[in-house]
Image: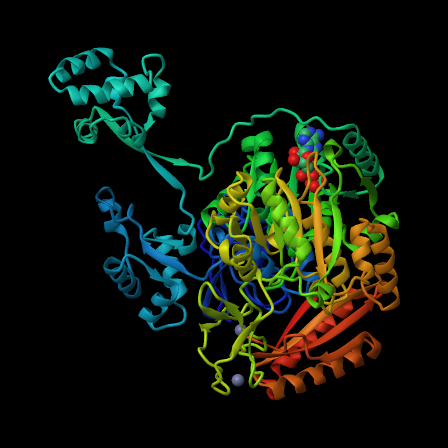
Amino acid sequence: MSELQPIVLNEEAPDERVTWFADIILPVPIPRMFTYRIPRVMEEMVQIGSRVIVQFGSKRILTGVVGKLHNDPPKKYNARYILEVLDNNPIVEPVQIRLFEWIANYYVCTVGEVLNIALPSGLKLSSESKAQLNPDFFSEDNQMSLAKVEFSEKEKIVLEALNEKSSLTYNEIGELLQEKSFYNTIKSLIAKEAILIYEEVKEKYKPKVIKKLRLSPSYARNPDQLEILFGSLEKRPKQMDVLLAYLHAVPQYQSASVNQVGIAKNQLMDRNLSASSVNTLIKNEVLEEFEEIVSRFETTVPTQEQVFLTDYQMQAKQQVLEHFQHKDTVLLHGITGSGKTEIYIDLIQEVLNSGGQVLYLLPEIALTTQIVLRLKKIFGDRMGIYHSRFSDNERVEVWQGILAGDYPLVVGVRSAVLLPFDNLSLIIVDEEHETSYKQFDPAPRYHARDVALMLARLHHSKTLLGSATPSIESYYHACHAKYGLVALNQRYGNAQLPKIELVDIKLERKQKTMREDFSSVLLDAMQGVLDKKEQAIIFQNRRGYAPFLHCEDCAHIPKCQNCDVSLTYHQYARELRCHYCGHHEAVPQECVACGSTKVKSVGFGTEKLEEEIQGLLPASRVQRMDLDTTRKKNSYELIIESFANHEMDFLVGTQMVSKGLDFDGVSLVGILDADRMIHFPDFRSHERTFQLITQVSGRSGRRDKVGRVIIQTTNLKQPILYKIIENDYLGLFEEEIHEREVYHYPPFVRIIRLTVKNPDKRVVDLAAVHLAHILKDRIGSSRVLGPEEPLISRLRNQYLMQLVIKLEKNLNIKAIKAALRDESVKLTKEKAFKKTNVVIDVDPY
Ligand code: ADP
Ligand code: ZN
Ligand code: ZN
């Protein structure tokens, strides 16, 4: 390896140095950090969490983040020097780096991968370092010193090229010079201050700038001049109007500082004033134009000081605090509508008053707009929001705002656990059972609730998990004294829980009282809702018109060309779509297999229900809320708003309608297909059905009215349905926990799922068998299940096979994870298994 020389300006006695080496987190798929030498001149600047530029391998220049400072030279290689430090102040907190390392170890990925997900791309690592001429160096003022500097031939080539093209990447410079050691040329040009190096990514984040106007200093500081100006403008009334409008809006007579602040240009332009006169005044240097960086977030002033908890809520809050005396984690099990949010708000206020930071996690902010609005009212600008629909620039501003201490409260989704907190006192995980807290793809495949618990440990802070339907795992920990448990069984304002009924659609079909997919019971109830001018939510956890098309003559079902799934029929878009890879194609006029025209759609999704309701209850106003109708930035909010304003009677939706909505008018919830949820082949299907139906049901009858929930099923004898009807969470828990113990599922064992992928079915089968064999040998054959074909055995042209590893809780999990990683990597490198990929998912969902 070629050794890079440091940029040495002032060589001092080496023993004065404190830190010689830095371990850098780099965006490469190798599970460790890399040691670099710190040049003497950079010693002060290189801090944990700063971004630096380094050379990696012989060709690549990478940006990384300093993870560790120390004095131990690497044993196996000669450390290179750090080339550049990008930040004066670190952008990553030291405690974040410890968290990232934990995540990488626990979820079997690299710290670089964690960093990659954590950093908004405006701050992100990239290899696009670029060089440009240093304008100061080549300026007129600098001609003297310029004459004194000598450039080598190579340096001249680079300077000439930069003169023509405004910038060059390191790779372009390498090609230009046709040699490997071109970094020396770059470095000496940097040392001579002839060129500047910058990171292309640094420009990705653009502060939002507005144009402003103020009175030029000559008038602002001099009332006499202003008098003269007035005189001279007497014949130019339009300009006079502008000037008077300015002086009215900015009373600069009172203090010079108001003039300094000025006024937004468009604000002056808006006032029926002549735009050309404004511009003339600028041209004549009466007004001065300047720019100001502003926040992308609207400022909000809190409108509410305090919440008043009910006695029950107060009691629950006291219990939470008592548990926190001895325990780090408390589970708040409060039924829907009990006012958990109010308790959170009260606790947050206490923490903020004592100077701590709070992180409030929500499963998906788009789905919880109402809660965010509620919090904004109370916490105003002290609250930062972090969420998937924000632009990257907005995310950078939240990140930097947290670093600057502007946001003691952060409300965010999953990835908010990765933000730069330095002083967390409390983490709230709302709806802790939600599966959207788990990231599927790409790595790190982390569970935000579980990461939050580790984050709390690193900050010595407390965690409050909240849910009306806790996950079996969390409730188990609460029952076994690992967490504190607080129950809240009263709804706010003494509202009653909804009354849940079952309808036997098998019977209705036999009696021919079904109309399309609606039972007569549900349809009558919907008519009643219309008559009373109330509202209803119709829930079906499946979007599109129908899950598939079916040929009545040859039984052919159109499938995705890339995946082993049937194509969903979307009538509105006139398309067949794959919900897994995004493939779509036109709806065939006739069966592609036999040419028959008897092609029918089977089953129903939200789109079809919307259409049916319009046909069955023509006087009603229906809207649909699912992934297809909420792709645009504010579409979700618009639908919610129009439903809240009673601009529609029925809202048809997927699980999106189950969360965070709180409407006065909803008196009925219809659940169209409970059976499909119950029979989904997964050990969590009963738990999920209970959670989903309870959550959706909770949307009805919130105030003084008792809501009604109607569940359509083909089998009235399913015990899980009665647990839902009776809101018997404990019953569910006891049965589930028993099954999990007997059949070895979490929380009694840990599950790690390995998915082997290859475009060739034969290869994937062989590779999976091979991996299973080796793993059985290494970690014990009873712990490795499979290989087995997953439910969907081909996705995006990759064939899949799965191994499930079940590990007892007391095992040395670290060693086993290392073995899984090693063997997976080895497998992908074997010639026989070319193009094989192994995805490791710890605690899969
Ligand atoms: P949960 O999250 O437990 O389902 P919410 O926090 O959404 O319940 O509360 C349900 C409704 O009751 C909300 O409209 C909320 O504003 C109201 N509410 C609850 N507690 C109070 C309180 N102490 N004061 C005023 N309104 C409350
Ligand atoms: Zn056919
Ligand atoms: Zn597909």
Q: Count the labels in the image.
A: 0
Above or below, comparing residue 607 to residue 138 in the picture: below
Of residues 303 and 426, which is closer to you in this image?
Answer: 303
Above or below, comparing residue 59 to residue 238 in the picture: below
Question: Can you give x and y, in whole percent of width and height, for residue 45 in the image?
Answer: 52, 46
Q: Quadrant of the C terminus?
A: bottom right
Above or below, comparing residue 501 to residue 818 in the picture: above
Question: Can you give x and y, in whole percent of width and height, for residue 399 in the image?
Answer: 53, 44
* Res 332 quadrant in image: top right
Q: Is residue 329 left or right of residue 250?
A: right
Asked whether residue 423 appears in the rendered view, the answer is no
Above or below, comparing residue 323 to residue 285 in the picture: below
* Res 236 quadrant in image: top left
Q: Is residue 343 left or right of residue 652?
A: right
Q: What residue appears at the point 79 percent right and 51 percent down from the top-left corner?
A: 725
Of residues 603 and 130, which is closer to you in this image?
Answer: 603
Q: What residue appears at the point 26 percent right and 30 percent down from the top-left corner?
A: 269
Of residues 393 and 63, which is closer to you in this image?
Answer: 393
Q: What residue appears at the point 78 percent right and 33 percent down from the top-left corner?
A: 317
Identify the colour scheme used. Answer: rainbow
Question: Can you give x and y, in whole percent of width and height, for residue 547 in the image?
Answer: 58, 69
Question: Can you give x and y, in whole percent of width and height, for residue 440 in the image?
Answer: 62, 63
Of residues 73 and 332, which is closer to you in this image?
Answer: 332
